[in-house]
Image (tube, helix red, strand yellow):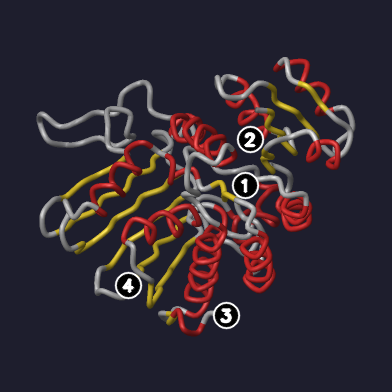
Amino acid sequence: MRIGVAGVGRIGAMHARTLGSLDQVDQVLLYDPLPGRAAAVARELGAAHVDTLDELLAGSAGVLLATPTDTHPELLRRAVGAGVPTLCEKPIAREVAEMAVLVADVEASGVPVLVGFQRRFDPAIVELHRRIRAGEVGTIYQVRATGNDAEPPDFGYLPSSGGIFRDLLIHDLDAVPWLVGEPVVQVFASGSVLVDQAFADADDVDNAVVVLRFAGGAHALLTGGRHNPLGYDHRVEVLGSRDSLAAGLDPRTPLTSLEPDGSRVGPDAHPGFVERFRAAYRNEMVVFTEVVAGRADNPSPVRDSLVSLRLAVACDQSRRTGAPVSMLEVAR
């Protein structure tokens, strides 16, 4: 099959390279609105390129959208209108109201659309999800998720990032409810500026905590930060009545134990999210091609991304007011 990639910046080029390595992909077709960039990346990867999105859609069995966020709604509608299965990087839209309309339109079309939340494709997290659904964890008591960047993002990116809850913690706001399998009924969030004044200047924070209360009574504690000098760190722990399980805890975890026989931070801690989730990104592309071929169900549907955006909005509201937020108060 031929898979198209719209937007070949860092993430798009990474996806294109991975797609080109898959046996089921005969050719990768590239498009980028920036003149000359698609041709340059195509030469590097041995791929083909086109000059317009219409050409990309006409020549692809499936298309991946990795263009700037503001372009996602229009491009996704064009892809769905052309009947082309699509994987769109998160978020598919910035605001809840806009996303709600877009989700309804996508679902009405019947065209498969996956949202690029790579944690849903991480081997350990997928296995954690399987064990929870199989009843091996029992009743979930608590979930703890940690996500820390090794280095802060470019400060010029901050004003357009949407803030720490929509940019960094959005991944856990998607993955944790997916793992628990219950709706969140209440959110509390708090944050501080401890890394750099640039975050405050962008009306953002660089360290944050989130408490989610689920309908069944379980709680999840999410923590996120923009600087961990030991390396990139992402872990999820689930404690239940039958078992306690963790994903992301291995010799590369940037955490030093003070116990005599405890773990030490090695020289190969992950420098960033691309390295930490390399297997997840590859699995994401494999699953996408299987969905395009009609051989797999969609594991990351658009309606779930609406759930995570609503949670991010609630987090920001709670952080600003200092009070818990009922999810009934957040526009659906």
Please tell me whether mark 3 sits on a helix, a strand or a loop: loop
221 left or right of 162?
A: left
Does the CB distance between marks 2 and 3 fall below 8 Å? Answer: no
For label 1, count other residues whose C-alpha is less than 10 Å away and answer few (under 14), some (14-19) or many (20+): many
Q: Residue at x 57, y 80 (%)?
A: 331
For label 4, count other residues whose C-alpha is less than 10 Å away and answer few (under 14), some (14-19) or many (20+): many
Comes first in the chain, label 4 or label 3: 4
128 left or right of 117?
A: left
Q: Residue at x 27, y 27 (%)?
A: 251
Residue positioned most to the bottom = 329
Q: CA distance from mark 4 to mark 3?
A: 18 Å
What residue would you read off at disc 3? 331
Comes first in the chain, label 2 or label 3: 2
Does the CB distance between marks 4 and 1 fall below 8 Å? Answer: no
What residue would you read off at disc 4? 213
Please tell me whether mark 4 sits on a helix, a strand or a loop: strand
Q: Position of residue 76 (x, y in %)?
A: 72, 53
Comes first in the chain, label 1 or label 2: 2
152 left or right of 276?
A: right
Specify the amino acid type for callout 3: Ala
Specify the amino acid type for callout 2: Ile
What residue would you read off at disc 1? 89
Q: Residue at x 73, y 35 (%)?
A: 60
Q: CA distance from mark 2 to mark 4?
A: 33 Å
